[in-house]
Amino acid sequence: MLSLVLVLWGIGTPSFWRDESVSVMAATMSFDELWRLLDDIDTVHALYYLLLRPFAAFGGEFAVRLPSALAVAGATFGIAAIGRKLATPQVGLLAGLVYAVLPMISRYGQETRSYALVSAVAVAATWVLLGERRSRYAGYGLLVALLGWFHLYALLLLPAHAVVVLRRRGETVPWLASLAGAGVLLAPLAVIASGQREEQLFWLKVPGLPELGQLGVDIAGGDEAWASPLLPALFLALLIALVLLGIWHGTRLRRRGVLTAGDRREGAGAAGHREDLTAGGRREGARAGGHREDLTAGEGPGRPSLVGVAVPWAVLPVVLSLLISQIHPVYSPRYVLFAVPGLALLAGAGLAALRRTPATWTVLAVLVAFSVSAHLVVRGPANRPDDLRTLAAELSAQERPGDAVLYVPERFRLFVAVYGEPYRRLSALGPGSDRVWLVSRRIRGPEWEEDPRLKELKRDFRKAGQTRISGAVRITLYTRRIPSDA
């Protein structure tokens, strides 16, 4: 509930940006128009656009961003459940709280794109994978297919799941069978998407260390939040420290053979004295004579540890995405948002490893305090890459009856028309047009400069006003040349 309240705070304040505009336009098109869009460039988002349609019918930022907010709440609940299953209720609670207060989670929980839903499905698939019954693999396969239909690159979660499965006896064959079934369901999407790759990902570059660092920047609130870098930097440093503490402490306990709650049930009759902690996370061991957190446990037959699940989950999707991108760029911080739950689990374990309740809650409070400035920035009216709301308002104030519009490329209409009233009043460029608003990329590549419509515009019209720029979108007024201008 806390995560839902947090993500709903200010959800309607930031302007839609160009990617959100495409989502809203796709969700409000006729099915014929939507089919043409999907056939042209956007098949990979087909399921999300269909899911969004009932919400888009209500209009406004709140309604269409609500699915993402609900997905964050669901993911938070799932992270707490996984933490409880692999360690203790305290670890689960703390991991869920860490996830809820991450500025990056609020950012994408307030966005009309599929990334928050991808993370929720990734959490659900991991939870099902950690079950005991073989029959769970039918549901797991469906969740993997759903994960791929929301975002194909989220299938980079599967190598992390493979690490878990290979440590469990007799699980490999049913797991592979479930993936085969998911592959059948995903095959049509993969075939079509492969032909649209250049249209979808032309903007991605080969990433290096700066791009990896951008993931940390985004987790702590994004570029705007780092304009005053002290608090975001402290937030990120403390988060990393908690993650490392969770890994270290969990690994240390595993080496000492401390059992998880699940392993204690399985090994109640085993020889030897081992700690038996309460559900809250502490009980003095008969021989240990001290307090140890029941975080990760020796994995035992069929019982993975928190570290064994969370580290591959947090690391492998990011590393593999970076490696693949050296050949075919596929990496973007938002594309690996589904790996962040692994970080939250480890940070929750790090908080629990502080052992004393006052220390645990004090450090969590400090983490929250460091995040406040970033949360305020994330909810700013112009925080997104484009402020299309202000751009539309400026156009509305300056346009005149009879003005025309030219989109270069043509699909840029989708990038701005979410606030469509001023654009709907503009006519198509024709022989009688004397004033034309050019809507285009902020930086036009040579392929757009060769557009015959743009060449005609520059031949017959001259730039007649200051360019209005919002992120990657620019709007420029052109007026028809008179003979003396030639």
Image: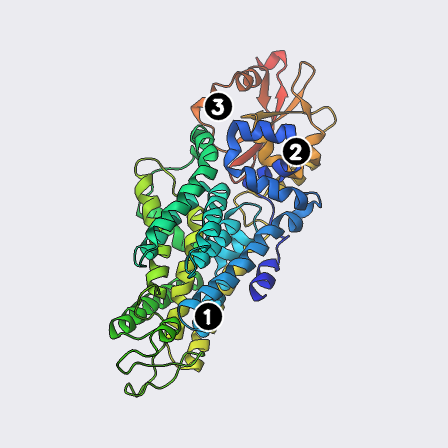
Name the spot of residue 293 as percent of width and height, x first: 36, 77
In percent of width and height, residue 226 lies at: 44, 56
Q: Is residue 159 above or below residue 465?
A: below
Q: Residues within 10 Å of mark 2 (few under 14, many from 20)?
A: some
Q: Which residue is mark 2?
A: 29
Q: Which mark is residue 448?
A: 3
Relative to 272, residue 300 above or below? above
Residue mark closest to the camera, 3 vs 1: 1
Query: Of label 3 and label 1, which has the lower sequence position?
Result: 1
Q: Amino acid at mark 1?
A: Leu
How is the rendered protein coloured?
Answer: rainbow
- Local crowd size for mark 3, using a 10 Å CA cut-off: few (<14), some (14–19), many (≥20): some
Answer whether residue 394 is visible to the viewer in this image.
yes
Residue, x 61% and y 16% (percent of image)?
Answer: 481
Identify the residue at horizontal 34%, vertical 65% (top origin): 305
Q: Residue at x 32, y 46 (%)?
A: 320
Residue 227 in sight in this render: no
Secondary structure at numbered mark 3: helix
| For residue 258, side relative to residue 28 (left or right) | left
Which residue bears the numbered disc 1?
A: 94
Q: Secondary structure at mark 1?
A: helix
Which quadrant does the N terminus fall into? bottom right
